Image: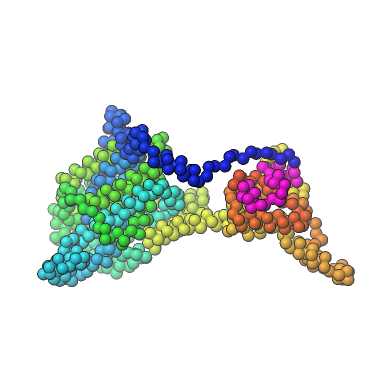
Amino acid sequence: HHRMFLEPQEKKKSMKALLVKQAKKTCSCTPAKVKDYVFSFFPVLQWLPKYKLREYLLGDIMSGVIVGVLLVPQSIAYSLLAGQEPVYGLYTSFFASIIYFIFGTSRHISVGIFGVICLMIGQVVDREIQRAGYDLEPAVLGVLTDTAANVNTTTLPGNQTLQKLLCDKSCYAITVGATMTFIAGVYQVAMGLFQVGFVSVYLSDSLLSGFVTGASFTILTSQAKYLLGLDIPRSSGIGSLVTTWINIFRNIHKTNICDLITSFLCFLVLIPTKELNEHFKSRLKAPIPVELVVIVAATLASHFGKLRETYGSSIAGHIPTGFLPPRPPDWNLIPNVALDAIPIAIIGFAITVSLSEMFAKKHSYSVKANQEMYAIGFCNIIPSFFHCFTTSAALAKTLVKESTGCRTQMSGMVTSLVILLVLLVIAPLFYSLQKCVLAVITIVNLRGALRRFRDLPKMWYLSRVDTVIWLVTMAASALISTEIGLLVGVCFSMLCVIFRTQRPEAPLLGWVAESETYESLSAYKNLQTKPGIVVFRFEAPLYYINKECFKSTLYKQTGVNPVWVKAAKEKAAKRTPREKEEHSGGKQTSISMDFASEPLGFHTIVIDCCAVQFLDTAGIRTLKEVCKDYGEIEVQVLLAQCNPSVRSSLIRGEFFKEGEDHLLFHSVHQAVDFA
């Protein structure tokens, strides 16, 4: 056996030296470094001076206008989902587009209102409104207000009744939404600052897809009451989906026929037109803005038909023009919503980063994941002072933006100008718009998420584990709650990884003729084995969770448990000559005698460690025990293809006796030749 000599690299510098070097690098300040920092923090300063007016402008204007036209009805509709007045949805879309224009690095993603996040905000808003007592009966509220009006307000600091006098239900709802948006933005910026974007790696594609689909059922359920014109309280907490449907069926006899017919007609128009948009998207230069057409037609029908006065239909109400003066978040609410903002922040930045990287790869440019976290964080922090709620990238609008010729972030600025026009001029015209129309728009936009069920057979064929993760996350998000569903999905996906390493594949290997390659005997035919040598591969890290699995599988595959063989030999050695004669005269022999007398059939076990990424102390101890146990029955164990980490762990763990470290082989073939 010719030992292969590999000279190790010099050890890395000490942690102290690395920290000092990094501190000097971070704290040093030169004009060039300041310039690079400013340009990286404000990407608009990099790409705007290089903007090719003739080449880019037409596509950016076209896509910006189309996305703006689509965003107006969706902003109004999703405000309902978030428990807010329609104007706040328009504010949110306006500010998010401008701020991402300044801080964002992706040219194609559309940042704005996202249905799942709106749902999560709405649940918290409803809870806080109930806590504050805004959901009391109207008569009780009237008595409280009259009583409070006669009391000197200076004697009631912090009193909830005084708060009601200063801020009505809709005002308090946006206060809660804005405060939670501020906290979510702070979390996202902190993630960027401390470079903890790795958190998003725990949100796999199947997990996110299942979460969005499960949340879509909750969104659909929350909007169903508007389709029927029912006035029932919004359920929140665990099992809200089931509770809501129970309440709907209990009150089904109170259905507003006018709202039901309007909803049905809107579905008849929206769904076929949306399908046509998708079917002919390669031929259409721009998608048909059917949502805007439906909203305009429904508003006109409601206004001139006097549907509210005649049939009692619920309408959007007054949407003011212009902007409200900025107001800071309510700092007293932060303890109440700080925990709720964590999943919102994580979902927001995970979706934004994944979409930006996906479209950057598709169009051959690069994005900075860390800068994207800053961008989405500031898209939440700054607007929270202007009566807005949480935003993130949205796939549907991003696809529209890309397909209509978007070239740069300038498209987002055009979108914000379209929304500004609506805010300054057009918004009050939507006064008579029925809420059931907004609910229909929200539900129709869930088609993409609900269609994922069609992909399940293909997903099952590709990966059964991913399919199970998808189903568990979807079911938990729908039936329990969105936040718990996300947590269940993350924990379940981690458990799947652990279970896969707990019971990994561990085949015996055979030799491919006329080569130095060894492959699984259970996977391939016509492989050869060397007499007296067993080659075994363990396809997982060897650590405390699977150490017993490693030993039991090795014993099963080789057909020899060295502990039993040793015990049988010791037991046989203790027998008296008379007992041996008695047993030799019998027709049957004991199991112990079988173990002691049968030849093993091999003298060497080669363990292929190419798939063992790391060892812990339990893993090292297990390998020591295996080598010792087999050594006691005169079978040697050789290790092959250990990576540097495993090799280092073995040496530190004193696996080899003095002078035996040469028995660590760089290939299976080399180990077999030695044996």
**Residue 382 in magenta?**
no
Of residue 107 and residue 328, the one placed in the foreground of this image is 328
What residue is rendered at 75% in x and 46% in y? Answer: 675
Residue 624 picture location, percent across and down: 68, 55
What is the basis of the colouring in this image? rainbow
Apparent side of residue 419 relative to residue 196 in the rendered image (left or right): left
The image shows residue 34 at horizontal and vertical percentages of 34, 36
Query: Where 145 falls versus 383 (above or below)?
Result: below
**Can the viewer see residue 1?**
yes
Q: Residue at x 66, y 48 (%)?
A: 608
Q: Which picture quadrant has residue 666?
A: top right
Q: Position of residue 641 (x, y in %)?
A: 65, 44
Location of residue 413 (image quadrant): top left
Q: Magenta stretch: give its range.
A: 647-675
Left or right: residue 467 versus residue 514 is left
What is the count of numbered marks?
A: 0
Q: Quadrant of the N terminus?
A: top right
Q: Is residue 660 magenta?
A: yes
Instruction: Give percent across and percent down for residue 40.
Output: 35, 38
At a point 16% along the width and 61% down the height, the residue shown is: 166
Which residue of the protein is positioned furthest toward the top in this rendering? Answer: 54
Horizontal side of residue 495 vs 165, given as left or right: right
